Image: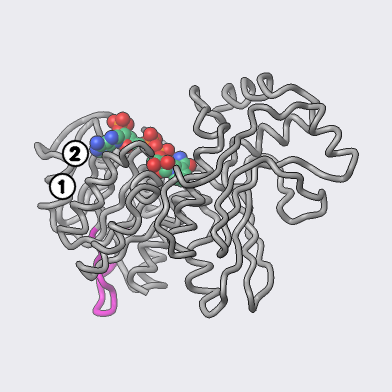
Amino acid sequence: MIILPINYSKSEGVKEDMNTKTVRISIIGFGNVGGGTAEVIRRKREEIAKKHGIDIKIVGIADLKGVIVNESGLSEDAIMKLNTGEKPADMTTLEVIKEVEHEVMVETTPTNVENGEPGLTHIITALESDRHVVTSNKGPLALQYRKLMQLAAQKGKELRFEASVGGAMPLISLVRENLAGNGIISIKGILNGTCNYILTRMVEEGLPYEHVLKEAQERGIAETDPSKDVEGIDTAVKLVILANSVFDRDVTYKDVEVEGITDITPEALKLANDAGYVIKLIGEVDRNGCQKVAPRLVPKHDPLNVGGTLNVATIKTDLAGDITVIGKGAGPIEAASAILSDIIGIYS
Ligand SMILES: NC(=O)c1ccc[n+]([C@@H]2O[C@H](COP(=O)([O-])OP(=O)(O)OC[C@H]3O[C@@H](n4cnc5c(N)ncnc54)[C@H](OP(=O)(O)O)[C@@H]3O)[C@@H](O)[C@H]2O)c1
C-alpha cells in the first residue's frame, strides 16, 4: 500500500468545456502502482484535459482493505482514507467493476502466473461490463492473452498493457504505433531490473551472488522471495506478452526456455570482462519461433549493456533497422506513467 505524500494538496479540478470528455476510471488493486496511478492523475489531470481533451475522474477504488466509490469523482480526502485503511463503501471489488458507471478499469493487483487470479476475473468482468481495461498485471496476459483480446474485440473495447512489460519503457505502443508498417524481426533485452542490479553489482564489486542478493533485498530492490526474478520467470512472462502481442503467437510462460542467474559466479563475470563482455539476463523473442531467457555475453559497447536496475530492449525491424529503448522497468510513478499513456491512448 503506497502512502501518498503528506503535502497531497487539493487540486483545483478541471473546468469542463464542450471539447473535454469526462473519462471515469476505477483502480482495482491500490498498492504501489494503483496508488502511483492516483498520484499521477492528481498531478496531471488539468494538463491532460488541456492537451488531450479528457478529464480523468477516479470514481472507484478497491483493494483488500476495502472499497471507496463516488460516481461524481472521488475526492482526494476519500482516496487518502483508503490509504489509511478506512472502508466507506459496502461493496465488493466485482460489484465496483460491474455496477459503478465508468469507462476504464485500471487493474493493478499482484501478478499470479499460476492461474492469473484475481486479475483475470477482474479483467473479464470489466470487459463483459463494457469497460476498457488498462493493466500492469502480467499474469492474466501471460496465461489467457488470446481469450482476453477476443473478448475485448467482441465487446468493442480496448485492453492495453504497456506497464506490464518494461514499466515506463515504451515497447508495445512503440512497436504498434511508431513502428507500424515495419516487420518486427526480433526483440531482445533486459526486462528484469532486479537481475540487472545483481549482475551489475557482482561485476563492480567482485562479490558472490548470495552477498549481492542480500544487499538487493536490504535495499528493497529484490523481494524476500526473489525466485521469480532470479530464476528468469518474470522475464519469461514478459517475453510471452511480447510473443503474443507483437508476434501474434498463442503461448504461455511454460513455452519459454528459461535459465536464471543463480549459478553465475564472480569468476565467470571477470573472465567475460577481461574479454570485453558483460553477462546479462537476456530475454529474446523472434519471428522464427524463438522465445528464450538466459544469461548471455553482451559486448561492453552494445546498447544492451545498461547497468543498475535499468531495463533495455532492442527491436530489430526490416525498415527502421535496430531501435533500442532504455528506461525504468519498475517504480510506482514509472509504471503509472505507462498506465496514464494507455488511458490517453484509448481516447486519442
Ligand atoms: N511495482 C512496480 O514497479 C510494477 C511495475 C510494472 C508492473 N507491476 C505489476 O503491477 C501489479 C501491481 O504491482 P504493485 O507493486 O502495485 O503491487 P502491490 O503493491 O502488492 O499492490 C497490489 C494491490 O492489490 C491489492 N489486491 C490484492 N488482491 C486483491 C483483490 N482480490 N481485489 C482487490 N485488490 C486486491 C492489494 O491489496 P492489499 O494491499 O490490501 O493487500 C494491493 O493493494 C502487479 O501485477 C505487478 O507485477 C508492478
- Residue 292 x/y as whole percent: 58, 48
Magenta-colored span: 12-24
Q: Going by the image, does 36 lie left or right of 67?
A: right
The residue at which mark 1 appears reads as 96
Q: Residue at x 52, y 68 (%)?
A: 175
Secondary-structure class at tag 1: helix
Q: Are marks 2 and 1 in contact (CB under 8 Å)?
A: yes
| Residue 19 sits in quarter | bottom left
Q: Going by the image, does 101 lie left or right of 218?
A: left
The residue at which mark 2 appears reads as 67
Q: Is residue 213 above or below residue 7?
A: above
How far apart, in angstroms, are the residues tagged by discs 2 and 1?
Answer: 8 Å
Q: Going by the image, does 103 lie left or right of 228?
A: left
Q: Residue at x 57, y 69 (%)?
A: 184
Q: Going by the image, does 188 lie left or right of 268?
A: left
| Mark 1 Cα shell of 10 Å, populated few (<14), some (14-19), many (≥20) | many
Residue 3 visible in this rendered orientation of the protein: no
- Residue 75 x/y as whole percent: 24, 48
